[in-house]
Image (cartoon, coloured by chain):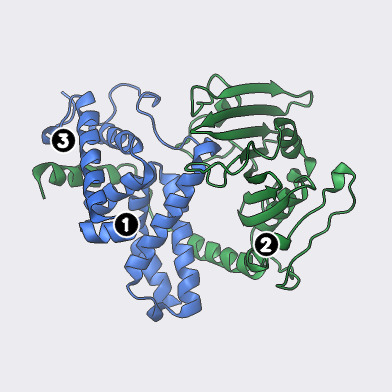
Chain colours: A blue, B green
């Protein structure tokens, strides 16, 4: 059990950031991570932590499943957890980092959940194409095209606030 | 990796660092794991495997007789004390599911049950086909709520609710006791949806929805129309049993 606690404590932060990029809200991310890790704890408790081959990959798959299942149900529950750049109350100029974050999250929001997951797995989790495809249950070619679409969407979104990928260091002029 | 891909990695990393909460909620994870184990022991899984076609409920409030549960094999479900905290509203998973099934018409059979805290779903089967039915029960809606969410009461105003499809029809009303009721109906890709959202004066939200499909996003259509009329759906959502 102590080993499991250490595993949960060590992985929690990174998984929460992954979940945040997937869902755009820290509190929903907290919920997703806790649900995923709880499932891992139950499975590891039942089977023994050593019996799960590659606990990190198992945990990542659990988080993805929880996120995708939750996304499928969120359509009609109307919980507006995504920040909408047009709706955010801003007093004065928001800090550049927060403006960047809101823009990126808004751009990610335009992607369907699986496409969003592909982008996060490839460019945040640093998974290669084959592993990303395996985690999502799609062909590697699908991952490539999904990531290309995401790239195009982010370019447009950043351009809307006068930024492009080459300007991410300097913020809005 | 291309320059754009490298930049994408950079912006994602910077995004993930903004306003990040501190600390790992390890105890919350283990508390949830405990509740998960409890839910499995009380037999939600048993309802699923025990010949679901044999599970049917009679609806007492339609005067057709006392409720009866027929479980095909699997044996009786033994109640196990849950470690989940008591909250306003009927949110315990088994209770949500049992109540949803109890409130369905006598003409349907409840299949493929699934529930978690504050949520329950079934596939209602009758002679005309299959309908997915979902219920969400959210106590203290909008209070002490999750920071980062917008004003959730705008959901109960058709002008601000944010309808999914421009063709959706929305009606909002406030009942004599202050209960707010919103109904939304629409058809997307041939799949018809009916939704009722209720907010009681005690800030208990009950949201129910039905579709004439089992998979409401991808289809296919499995019934000419959803099994519950809007009036039946509203009666279900307004049933006082959801107050717990």
Q: Nearer the viewer, residue B212 or B38?
A: B212
Tag 2 near tag 1, CB within 8 Å: no
Quarter holding residue B210: top right
Q: Chain of mark 2?
A: B
Q: Is residue B54 left or right of residue B154?
A: right
Of marks 2 and 3, the one in the foreground: 2
Q: Badge 3 is on which residue?
A: A168
Which image quarter is the C terminus of chain A in? top left
Q: Nearer the viewer, residue A93 or B233?
A: B233
Q: Is residue B98 left or right of residue B184?
A: right
Residue under the point 76% across and 35% down: B235
**Marks 2 and 3: same chain?**
no
Q: Badge 1 is on which residue?
A: A14
Query: Relative to B176, is B136 above or below?
Result: below
**Marks 2 and 1: same chain?**
no
Image location (x, y in percent) of residue B169: 59, 22
Image location (x, y in percent) of residue A105: 32, 37
Secondary structure type for disc 2: helix
Tag 2 near tag 3, CB within 8 Å: no
Q: CA distance from mark 1 to mark 3?
A: 23 Å
Can residue A30 be seen in the rendering of this structure? no
């Amino acid at each position: 059990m102590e080993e499991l606690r250490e595993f949960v404590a060590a992985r929690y932060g990174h998984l929460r950031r992954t979940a945040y990029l997937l869902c755009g809200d820290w509190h929903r991310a907290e919920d997703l991570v806790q649900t995923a890790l709880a499932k891992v704890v139950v499975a590891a408790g039942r089977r023994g932590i050593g019996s799960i081959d590659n606990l990190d990959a198992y945990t990542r798959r659990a988080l993805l499943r929880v996120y995708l299942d939750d996304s499928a149900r969120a359509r009609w529950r109307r919980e507006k957890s995504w920040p909408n750049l047009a709706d955010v109350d801003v007093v004065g100029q928001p800090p550049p980092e927060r403006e960047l974050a809101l823009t990126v999250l808004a751009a990610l929001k335009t992607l369907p959940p699986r496409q969003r997951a592909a982008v996060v797995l490839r460019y945040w989790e640093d998974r290669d194409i084959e592993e990303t495809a395996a985690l999502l249950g799609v062909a590697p070619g699908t991952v490539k095209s999904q990531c290309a679409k995401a790239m195009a969407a982010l370019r447009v979104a950043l351009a809307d606030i006068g930024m492009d990928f080459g300007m991410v260091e300097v913020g809005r002029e | 990796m291309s320059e754009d891909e490298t930049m994408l990695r950079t912006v994602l990393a910077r995004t993930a660092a903004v306003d990040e909460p501190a600390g790992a909620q390890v105890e919350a994870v283990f508390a949830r794991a405990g509740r998960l184990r409890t839910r499995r022991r009380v037999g939600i899984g048993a309802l699923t495997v025990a010949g679901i076609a044999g599970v049917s409920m009679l609806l007492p409030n339609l005067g057709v007789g006392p409720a009866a549960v027929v479980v095909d094999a699997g044996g009786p479900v033994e109640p196990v004390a849950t470690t989940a905290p008591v909250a306003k509203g009927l949110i315990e998973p088994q209770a949500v599911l049992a109540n949803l099934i109890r409130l369905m018409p006598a003409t349907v059979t409840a299949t493929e049950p699934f529930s978690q805290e504050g949520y329950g779903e079934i596939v209602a089967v009758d002679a005309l086909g299959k309908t997915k039915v979902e219920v969400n029960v959210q106590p203290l809606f909008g209070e002490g709520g999750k920071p980062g969410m917008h004003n959730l009461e705008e959901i109960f105003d058709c002008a601000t609710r944010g309808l999914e499809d421009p063709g959706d029809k929305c009606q909002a009303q406030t009942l004599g006791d202050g209960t707010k009721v919103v109904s939304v109906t629409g058809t997307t890709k041939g799949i018809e949806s009916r939704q009722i959202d209720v907010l009681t004066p005690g800030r208990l939200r009950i949201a129910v929805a039905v579709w004439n499909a089992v998979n409401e996003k991808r289809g296919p259509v499995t019934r000419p129309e959803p099994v519950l009329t809007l009036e039946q759906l509203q009666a279900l959502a307004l049933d006082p049993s959801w107050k717990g």
